[in-house]
């Protein structure tokens, strides 16, 4: 039997304030975060009852059929519902899935175009920003809606 290890066991928490009350991080960042959370990692956990948790189960594979766009509006609605909380958006590494969701929020809520959104997020990060190519294509389509 093979045991799955929690990601970043030896990695430090990475968390960056992107805009307003929206934070972007890796898996470890949820442990000391006080606020609502969008969890796009491969792992489940429970948070303090004071805050809300949205669990999105999406793979970080290179499979071009992986549809992250189906969760854009759900995540934007979650942010609106929890607008008085700090909100952490994270996946395992904080590089692709969570970045893609933050970009969708910047596009829809703040009216950024995709290029400006990417540059803005990169300027706020202490960690790499590299959404998968098929996620970027979905974001490009999202800018046209």
Image (cartoon, helix red, strand yellow):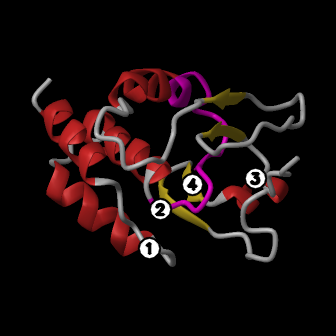
Labels 2 and 3: the sequence-earlier one: 3
Which mark is in front, 2 or 4? 2
Q: Which residue is mark 3?
A: 30
Q: How many marks?
A: 4
Give the quarter of the figure containing the C terminus: top left
Disc 1 to disc 3, how far (Cα)?
Answer: 18 Å
**Dots 2, 1 in contact, CB < 8 A:** yes
Q: Which residue is mark 2?
A: 95
From what the image shows, is residue 134 above or below residue 82? below
Labels 1 and 3: the sequence-earlier one: 3
Which mark is in front, 1 or 4? 1
Stretch in magenta: 78-95
Q: Which residue is at the far left?
A: 144
Q: Residues within 10 Å of mark 3 (few under 14, many from 20)?
A: many
State left or right for residue 101 relative to residue 25.
left
Name the secondary structure under disc 3.
Answer: helix
Q: Pick whichever, 10 or 141, lies toward us.
A: 10
Name the secondary structure under disc 2.
Answer: loop
Labels 2 and 1: the sequence-earlier one: 2
State left or right for residue 39 relative to residue 5.
left
Residue 84 at what x, y percent from top left?
63, 34
State left or right for residue 13 relative to residue 21.
right
Labels 2 and 4: the sequence-earlier one: 4
Residue depicted at 18% across the width and 59% down the height: 116
Q: Which residue is mark 1?
A: 128
């Amino acid at each position: 039997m093979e045991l799955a290890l929690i990601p970043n066991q030896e990695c430090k928490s990475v968390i960056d304030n992107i805009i307003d009350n929206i934070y972007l991080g890796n898996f470890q960042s949820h442990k000391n975060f006080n606020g609502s959370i969008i969890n796009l990692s491969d792992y489940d956990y429970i948070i303090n009852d004071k805050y809300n948790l949205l669990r999105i189960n999406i793979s970080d594979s290179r499979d071009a059929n992986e549809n992250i766009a189906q969760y854009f509006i759900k995540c934007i609605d979650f942010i609106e519902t929890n607008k008085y909380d700090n909100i952490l958006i994270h996946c395992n590494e904080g590089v692709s899935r969570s970045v893609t969701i933050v970009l969708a929020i910047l596009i829809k809520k703040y009216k950024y175009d995709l290029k400006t959104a990417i540059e803005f997020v990169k300027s706020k990060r202490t960690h790499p920003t590299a959404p998968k190519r098929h996620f970027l294509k979905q974001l490009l389509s999202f800018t046209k809606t």
